[in-house]
Image (cartoon, grey):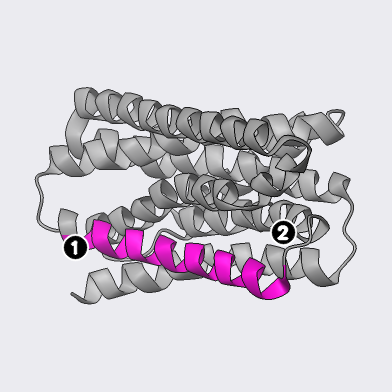
Amino acid sequence: MFVSLQALLWGTAAGSALLIGAAAAWWLRISRVWVCAVMAFGAGVLVSALSFELVLEAFTLGGLAATVAGVVAGALLYFGANTLLAKRSRRKRRARGAGGAESSSGSAIAVGALIDGIPESVALGLGLVAGASVNPTMLIAIFVSNIPEGLASSADMKASGRSGRSVFTLWASIALASGLAAFIGAIALEGMPAEVLAFTTAVAAGGILTMIADTMIPEAYAVDHDYTGLLVTAGFLSAFSLHAIGG
Protein backbone atom coordinates (compact mmCIF):
# COMPACT_ATOMS: atom_id res chain seq x y z
CA MET A 1 0.00 0.00 0.00
CA PHE A 2 2.90 2.36 0.74
CA VAL A 3 4.10 2.07 -2.86
CA SER A 4 0.63 2.86 -4.22
CA LEU A 5 0.37 5.93 -1.99
CA GLN A 6 3.75 7.10 -3.24
CA ALA A 7 2.48 6.62 -6.78
CA LEU A 8 -0.58 8.74 -5.98
CA LEU A 9 1.64 11.49 -4.56
CA TRP A 10 4.11 11.58 -7.46
CA GLY A 11 1.46 11.23 -10.14
CA THR A 12 -0.45 14.17 -8.69
CA ALA A 13 2.77 16.18 -8.36
CA ALA A 14 3.61 15.61 -12.02
CA GLY A 15 0.08 16.52 -13.07
CA SER A 16 0.23 19.70 -10.97
CA ALA A 17 2.53 21.18 -13.63
CA LEU A 18 -0.67 21.69 -15.65
CA LEU A 19 -1.82 24.08 -12.92
CA ILE A 20 1.51 25.92 -13.02
CA GLY A 21 1.13 26.38 -16.76
CA ALA A 22 -2.47 27.51 -16.31
CA ALA A 23 -1.46 30.07 -13.66
CA ALA A 24 1.27 31.43 -15.91
CA ALA A 25 -1.19 31.81 -18.79
CA TRP A 26 -3.77 33.49 -16.58
CA TRP A 27 -1.58 36.07 -14.87
CA LEU A 28 1.44 36.53 -17.14
CA ARG A 29 1.93 37.57 -20.74
CA ILE A 30 3.95 34.77 -22.35
CA SER A 31 4.44 34.70 -26.10
CA ARG A 32 3.47 31.64 -28.10
CA VAL A 33 7.09 31.29 -29.22
CA TRP A 34 8.26 30.66 -25.66
CA VAL A 35 5.41 28.25 -24.99
CA CYS A 36 6.37 26.21 -28.04
CA ALA A 37 10.05 26.39 -27.14
CA VAL A 38 9.30 24.76 -23.78
CA MET A 39 7.10 22.23 -25.57
CA ALA A 40 9.92 21.28 -27.95
CA PHE A 41 12.39 20.93 -25.07
CA GLY A 42 9.86 18.83 -23.14
CA ALA A 43 9.36 16.59 -26.17
CA GLY A 44 13.09 15.86 -26.26
CA VAL A 45 13.10 15.12 -22.53
CA LEU A 46 10.21 12.70 -22.95
CA VAL A 47 11.81 10.92 -25.91
CA SER A 48 14.93 10.32 -23.84
CA ALA A 49 12.94 9.23 -20.79
CA LEU A 50 10.76 6.76 -22.65
CA SER A 51 13.78 5.35 -24.49
CA PHE A 52 16.03 4.77 -21.48
CA GLU A 53 13.54 4.56 -18.63
CA LEU A 54 10.54 2.79 -20.19
CA VAL A 55 11.44 0.81 -23.31
CA LEU A 56 14.81 -0.34 -22.02
CA GLU A 57 13.28 -1.17 -18.63
CA ALA A 58 10.52 -3.16 -20.32
CA PHE A 59 13.03 -5.08 -22.43
CA THR A 60 15.12 -5.86 -19.34
CA LEU A 61 12.05 -7.03 -17.42
CA GLY A 62 10.19 -9.10 -20.00
CA GLY A 63 12.13 -9.40 -23.23
CA LEU A 64 11.66 -8.20 -26.79
CA ALA A 65 8.24 -9.72 -27.59
CA ALA A 66 6.46 -8.17 -24.58
CA THR A 67 8.16 -4.83 -25.22
CA VAL A 68 7.28 -4.62 -28.92
CA ALA A 69 3.71 -5.76 -28.27
CA GLY A 70 3.29 -3.14 -25.56
CA VAL A 71 4.67 -0.27 -27.62
CA VAL A 72 2.41 -1.16 -30.55
CA ALA A 73 -0.62 -1.48 -28.25
CA GLY A 74 0.11 1.88 -26.61
CA ALA A 75 0.52 3.61 -29.96
CA LEU A 76 -2.75 2.16 -31.25
CA LEU A 77 -4.63 3.06 -28.06
CA TYR A 78 -3.47 6.67 -28.21
CA PHE A 79 -4.15 6.89 -31.94
CA GLY A 80 -7.67 5.50 -31.52
CA ALA A 81 -8.55 7.78 -28.61
CA ASN A 82 -7.11 10.83 -30.33
CA THR A 83 -8.98 10.04 -33.56
CA LEU A 84 -12.29 9.74 -31.71
CA LEU A 85 -11.59 13.01 -29.91
CA ALA A 86 -10.83 14.81 -33.17
CA LYS A 87 -14.03 13.53 -34.80
CA ARG A 88 -16.09 14.59 -31.80
CA SER A 89 -14.56 18.08 -31.85
CA ARG A 90 -15.26 18.46 -35.59
CA ARG A 91 -18.90 17.45 -35.08
CA LYS A 92 -19.29 20.02 -32.30
CA ARG A 93 -17.78 22.78 -34.45
CA ARG A 94 -20.12 21.96 -37.33
CA ALA A 95 -23.12 21.93 -34.97
CA ARG A 96 -22.20 25.28 -33.43
CA GLY A 97 -21.18 27.00 -36.66
CA ALA A 98 -19.40 30.28 -36.04
CA GLY A 99 -19.51 29.74 -32.30
CA GLY A 100 -17.48 26.57 -32.51
CA ALA A 101 -14.39 28.13 -30.94
CA GLU A 102 -15.79 27.45 -27.50
CA SER A 103 -15.66 23.68 -28.09
CA SER A 104 -11.88 23.83 -28.16
CA SER A 105 -11.87 25.01 -24.55
CA GLY A 106 -14.32 22.46 -23.19
CA SER A 107 -14.27 18.72 -22.76
CA ALA A 108 -11.95 18.21 -25.75
CA ILE A 109 -9.02 19.80 -23.92
CA ALA A 110 -9.77 17.81 -20.76
CA VAL A 111 -9.93 14.52 -22.63
CA GLY A 112 -6.82 15.39 -24.62
CA ALA A 113 -4.86 16.12 -21.44
CA LEU A 114 -6.05 12.85 -19.94
CA ILE A 115 -4.97 10.94 -23.04
CA ASP A 116 -1.48 12.36 -22.49
CA GLY A 117 -1.46 12.18 -18.71
CA ILE A 118 -2.74 8.67 -18.01
CA PRO A 119 0.05 6.69 -19.72
CA GLU A 120 2.63 9.07 -18.24
CA SER A 121 1.25 8.60 -14.74
CA VAL A 122 0.94 4.84 -15.13
CA ALA A 123 4.62 4.86 -16.13
CA LEU A 124 5.47 6.59 -12.85
CA GLY A 125 3.49 4.01 -10.90
CA LEU A 126 5.20 1.20 -12.78
CA GLY A 127 8.59 2.68 -11.95
CA LEU A 128 7.73 2.54 -8.27
CA VAL A 129 6.53 -1.06 -8.55
CA ALA A 130 9.64 -2.16 -10.41
CA GLY A 131 12.24 -0.11 -8.53
CA ALA A 132 10.60 0.82 -5.19
CA SER A 133 11.40 4.52 -5.83
CA VAL A 134 10.21 7.16 -8.27
CA ASN A 135 12.19 7.50 -11.48
CA PRO A 136 13.56 11.09 -11.33
CA THR A 137 14.17 11.36 -15.09
CA MET A 138 10.62 10.28 -15.91
CA LEU A 139 9.16 12.57 -13.25
CA ILE A 140 11.07 15.61 -14.57
CA ALA A 141 10.16 14.75 -18.16
CA ILE A 142 6.45 14.57 -17.39
CA PHE A 143 6.54 17.74 -15.27
CA VAL A 144 8.36 19.77 -17.93
CA SER A 145 6.10 18.55 -20.75
CA ASN A 146 2.90 19.34 -18.81
CA ILE A 147 3.70 23.04 -18.27
CA PRO A 148 3.33 24.19 -21.91
CA GLU A 149 0.18 22.09 -22.33
CA GLY A 150 -1.51 23.80 -19.39
CA LEU A 151 -0.14 27.17 -20.49
CA ALA A 152 -1.22 27.05 -24.12
CA SER A 153 -4.63 25.52 -23.43
CA SER A 154 -5.43 27.94 -20.61
CA ALA A 155 -4.49 30.91 -22.78
CA ASP A 156 -7.01 29.71 -25.37
CA MET A 157 -9.67 29.18 -22.70
CA LYS A 158 -9.10 32.65 -21.27
CA ALA A 159 -9.43 34.17 -24.75
CA SER A 160 -12.73 32.31 -25.28
CA GLY A 161 -14.22 33.80 -22.11
CA ARG A 162 -13.95 30.91 -19.67
CA SER A 163 -13.87 31.89 -15.98
CA GLY A 164 -10.73 31.42 -13.94
CA ARG A 165 -12.58 29.15 -11.53
CA SER A 166 -13.69 26.76 -14.25
CA VAL A 167 -10.22 26.68 -15.83
CA PHE A 168 -8.39 25.88 -12.59
CA THR A 169 -11.04 23.36 -11.54
CA LEU A 170 -10.55 21.61 -14.87
CA TRP A 171 -6.76 21.33 -14.52
CA ALA A 172 -6.93 20.41 -10.83
CA SER A 173 -9.27 17.55 -11.76
CA ILE A 174 -6.86 16.34 -14.44
CA ALA A 175 -3.92 16.55 -12.01
CA LEU A 176 -5.88 14.44 -9.52
CA ALA A 177 -6.84 11.98 -12.26
CA SER A 178 -3.15 11.64 -13.14
CA GLY A 179 -2.40 10.78 -9.52
CA LEU A 180 -5.22 8.24 -9.43
CA ALA A 181 -3.91 6.64 -12.63
CA ALA A 182 -0.51 6.17 -11.01
CA PHE A 183 -2.17 4.87 -7.82
CA ILE A 184 -4.39 2.35 -9.62
CA GLY A 185 -1.53 1.25 -11.85
CA ALA A 186 0.69 0.57 -8.85
CA ILE A 187 -2.02 -1.43 -7.04
CA ALA A 188 -3.08 -3.43 -10.08
CA LEU A 189 0.44 -4.33 -11.18
CA GLU A 190 2.18 -4.98 -7.88
CA GLY A 191 3.23 -8.64 -7.77
CA MET A 192 2.47 -9.26 -11.44
CA PRO A 193 4.82 -11.38 -13.61
CA ALA A 194 7.73 -9.60 -15.25
CA GLU A 195 6.22 -10.01 -18.71
CA VAL A 196 3.03 -8.21 -17.63
CA LEU A 197 5.04 -5.34 -16.13
CA ALA A 198 7.13 -5.15 -19.29
CA PHE A 199 4.07 -5.06 -21.54
CA THR A 200 2.35 -2.37 -19.46
CA THR A 201 5.49 -0.26 -19.26
CA ALA A 202 5.85 -0.48 -23.02
CA VAL A 203 2.17 0.47 -23.51
CA ALA A 204 2.88 3.71 -21.66
CA ALA A 205 5.96 4.28 -23.83
CA GLY A 206 4.02 3.70 -27.05
CA GLY A 207 1.26 6.10 -26.00
CA ILE A 208 3.69 8.82 -25.00
CA LEU A 209 5.79 8.46 -28.16
CA THR A 210 2.70 8.72 -30.37
CA MET A 211 1.52 11.77 -28.43
CA ILE A 212 4.92 13.46 -28.93
CA ALA A 213 4.87 12.80 -32.68
CA ASP A 214 1.21 13.76 -33.13
CA THR A 215 0.99 16.76 -30.83
CA MET A 216 4.04 18.23 -29.12
CA ILE A 217 6.57 18.42 -31.96
CA PRO A 218 4.09 19.50 -34.68
CA GLU A 219 2.68 22.27 -32.45
CA ALA A 220 6.15 23.49 -31.57
CA TYR A 221 7.33 23.34 -35.19
CA ALA A 222 4.33 25.33 -36.38
CA VAL A 223 5.52 28.34 -34.35
CA ASP A 224 9.29 28.14 -33.89
CA HIS A 225 10.30 25.69 -36.62
CA ASP A 226 13.75 27.27 -37.01
CA TYR A 227 14.77 26.06 -33.54
CA THR A 228 12.51 23.08 -32.84
CA GLY A 229 15.09 20.44 -33.76
CA LEU A 230 17.77 22.07 -31.62
CA LEU A 231 15.43 22.38 -28.64
CA VAL A 232 14.29 18.75 -28.92
CA THR A 233 17.94 17.68 -29.05
CA ALA A 234 18.76 19.83 -26.01
CA GLY A 235 15.91 18.25 -24.07
CA PHE A 236 16.98 14.76 -25.11
CA LEU A 237 20.61 15.32 -24.04
CA SER A 238 19.55 16.92 -20.76
CA ALA A 239 17.43 13.93 -19.81
CA PHE A 240 20.05 11.47 -21.02
CA SER A 241 22.69 13.21 -18.89
CA LEU A 242 20.42 12.95 -15.88
CA HIS A 243 19.92 9.25 -16.61
CA ALA A 244 23.66 8.67 -17.03
CA ILE A 245 24.54 10.49 -13.81
CA GLY A 246 21.79 8.74 -11.88
CA GLY A 247 22.70 5.35 -13.35
Q: Which structural element holds mark 1? A: helix
Q: Of callouts 1 and 2, which one flags the residue occurring earlier in the amino acid sequence?
A: 2
Magenta segment, prevailing SS (helix, strand or loop): helix
Q: Which stretch did the figure color magenta?
A: 163-187
**Do tag 1 and tag 2 residues touch (Cβ < 8 Å)?**
no
Q: Quadrant of the N terminus?
A: bottom left
Q: Residue at x 42, y 61 (%)?
A: 178
- Give x and y (percent) for residue 127: 32, 55
Image quarter for residue 59? top left
Inspect this view and state whether residue 245 appears. no
Q: CA distance from mark 1 to mark 2?
A: 33 Å
Tell me residue 130's x, y (percent). Answer: 24, 55
Residue drawn where x is 78% and y is 37% of the image: 98
Which kind of residue does numbered mark 2 sit on? Ser
Numbered mark located on residue 154 in the image: 2
Q: Nearer the viewer, residue 6 or 173?
A: 173
* Residue carrying label 1: 187
Q: Amino acid at mark 1?
A: Ile
